[in-house]
Amino acid sequence: MDNAMLLIRVRNAKYPDIFSEKHAILDTEFGVILRNFRAKTLDPSGQIVQVRPLDYGAAIKEYISGLRPKVLGKKWTECDHLLWPYAVDDKFWVLFHLDLVDWKLIILDNNQCFIDDAKLHYHILPCMNIFPEMIQKHLPDFGRKKMKSLDYWRKSFVDLPQLQQPR
């Protein structure tokens, strides 16, 4: 999965006139870090148990500053969108897309029959709580604009505009 993300970052850097440079494509390690936050912030019933202030650690700060991923990482201050692959229960991949402009989290799920909404909500609940605080703490100019809570939408490949009209 990381090789696919790397190839997309290389392609975007190689052809900046074709591909938008206002996004950061992160790696699977970012999803692992978020999964660790899930373990720290949710009890087994799915209720939030969070001790303030939450320390994001050096790894998250490296992602925000563009030092991670190590090849073609990008500062989040230069981005309108963050994308990263995420393994749900280490079995099923989805793509998380954090839209920093419209302030929403979009989960691209190519086959929604494998994981139900409740299970997916369990995985994304920490993201919905972590990102607003993380943005306000580490991107203060942006964080002042976005004080509302983060919403999410689940999309499937059938929702893509390209698939709505036959060619």
Image (tube, helix red, strand yellow):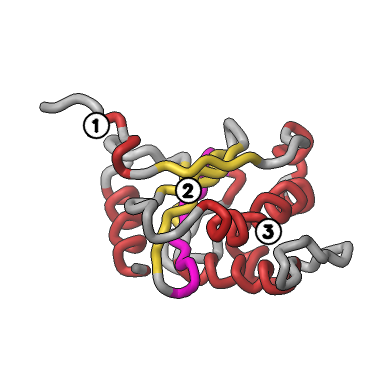
Residue 51 spot, x, y in % from top left: 87, 66
Label 3 vs label 2: CA separation?
A: 14 Å
Q: Secondary structure at mark 1?
A: helix
Q: Secondary structure at mark 3?
A: helix
Q: Quadrant of residue 27?
A: bottom left
- Determine crowd level at label 2: few under 14, some 14-19, many 20+ residues with C-alpha closer than 10 A: many
Residue 163 spot, x, y in % from top left: 23, 33
Q: Earlier in the sequence, mark 3 or mark 2?
A: 2
Q: Is residue 67 above or below residue 124?
A: below
Identified by mark 1, the residue type is Gln
Identified by mark 2, the residue type is Ile
Tell me the residue that label 3 is attached to: 126
Tag on residue 100?
none
Q: Earlier in the sequence, mark 1 or mark 2?
A: 2
Quadrant assignment for the N terminus: bottom left
Tell me the residue that label 1 is attached to: 162
The residue nearer to you, when weighing 158 against 72, is 158
Q: Is residue 155 above or below residue 130?
A: above
Quadrant assignment for the C terminus: top left
Identified by mark 3, the residue type is Pro
Q: Residue furthest right?
A: 52
Tell me the residue that label 2 is attached to: 107
* Majority secondary structure of magenta residues: strand
Range shown magenta: 78-90
Q: Are marks 1 and 3 in contact (CB under 8 Å)?
A: no
